[in-house]
Image: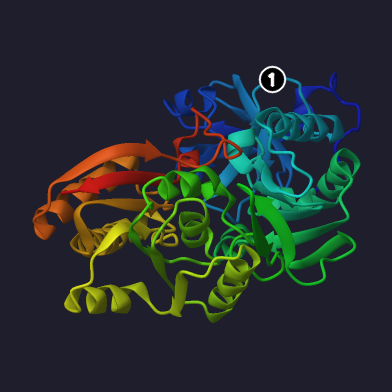
Amino acid sequence: MRAVPPSSQSAPVEMLPKVVLKPQKSRKFSSRHPWVFEKAIDRVEGDAADGDEVELVTHRGKFVARGVFNARSRIRVRLYSWTAGQWLDEMFWRQRLQEAIALRRHLGYDDPEGAARLVFSEGDGLSGLVVDRYRDYLAVQVTALGMEARLPLLIRLLVELTQPRGIVVRTERGMTQAEGISLRDGPSWGEPPQGPLLVRENGLLWQVDMMEGHKTGFYLDQRENRLLAARFAKGRRVLDMFCYTGGFSITASALGGAVEVTAFDSSPKAIELAKQNAELNKVTNVRFGEGEAFQVLPELVAAGQRFGLVILDPPKFARSRAARQEALRAYHWLNRLGMELTEPAGTLVTCSCSGVISREDFRDVLIGAAQQARRSVQVLEQRGASPDHPVAVNCPETEYLKCFVCRVI
């Protein structure tokens, strides 16, 4: 990455390489969608190396936005500024980080013993960067080459703005190769965490493995949805599939008043941590088991099991549009069996975190599953991620999490 003048607000725009759009392709990016795919680009004028700042212009040469170039990625340019002459320098990144952190404080997600997402990539105008806070540690997840190139600067700014004890870098499976990222997971700054950290959420205690856990260690996006599901647990038997470290299960028992909870996950490490979380919260009526959903659910149906509350929170089934149809079939199968396991007038809480599956797609899945299960279904609530995962209206992909609360008659 070539250096940019540190105080270059008045520098001539000719200093930057130009990425020229094809005719009729500028409207989407003028509306501030941050991803410019290869098929929208006519040509590149100037010497643009991977990680370089570039200017996006129309086929007539009119300014559209500024972003970062990456010839290795399907997303050729990630856009960050729509202000002509604004450089993506230290001042720019500092301001974006400050705005993101201020939002979480405003939301009340600043409990020093708690956890929150401080930066949500495109949702905060910082495409390719996720920052999660666990007590006084930060987990920084990089999913764009341009952010990797600027990581030393970003780490320095995060240290200045949040004063953490330590920072851990995490990568996302599939994105390192797609973006040409060479980072490896591990400590990046300060004191590394010694084993799982203990954080507080909704008055309960959770152990979080920042170094090896899923995502950055905990599913922060389900914070409010865990409480919501617990509202339907009182006096009921609960089934929690894909339970990970027990977020939905333990909340349903400790705060929801469930009679008993049966929970499964395919990860032995996650199950062990879930059992420890149950002990921490003095929960004794949750039974955790190791098992694959696609094997466990048919066995439960065959055994005639029924539950008053069924929770389905699977991992991402589709990472690209090419996998969309297969993912829809998997969601259909999962929800059909979930409905069969729900007792009459019981509740199904079902989720999808696949960004390429829209809310309308997921609703259609539920329609088909209900038909095959021969059950009538009422949708009581539709939810998304917690507010520290803001949805950017110009980037529908930020609305990745769908959570439907259904009454199954």
Write down the quadrant of residue 53 in the picture: top right
Q: Residue at x 66, y 58 (%)?
A: 205
Pointer 1 residue? 83
Q: Residue at x 44, y 52 (%)?
A: 353
**Residue 58 placed where, x, y %?**
54, 24
Tell me if residue 50 can be seen: no
- Is residue 192 left or right of 40 when viewed as pictured? right
**Residue 385 placed where, x, y %?**
50, 42
- Is residue 72 left or right of 161 when viewed as pictured? left
Looking at the image, which is closer to me, 120 or 296? 296
Looking at the image, which is closer to me, 377 or 99? 377
Looking at the image, which is closer to me, 179 or 10? 179
The amino acid type, in three-letter code, at marker 1 is Thr
- Is residue 377 left or right of 296 when viewed as pictured? left
Q: Residue at x 35, y 48 (%)?
A: 357
**Residue 263 placed where, x, y %?**
42, 70
Neighbourhood count class around disc 1 (C-alpha, 10 Å): few under 14, some 14–19, many 20 upward: few
**Residue 368 placed where, x, y %?**
15, 52
**Whether residue 329 is situated above or below residue 352 in the rendered picture:** below
Tell me if residue 387 can be seen: yes
Question: What is the count of numbered marks?
Answer: 1
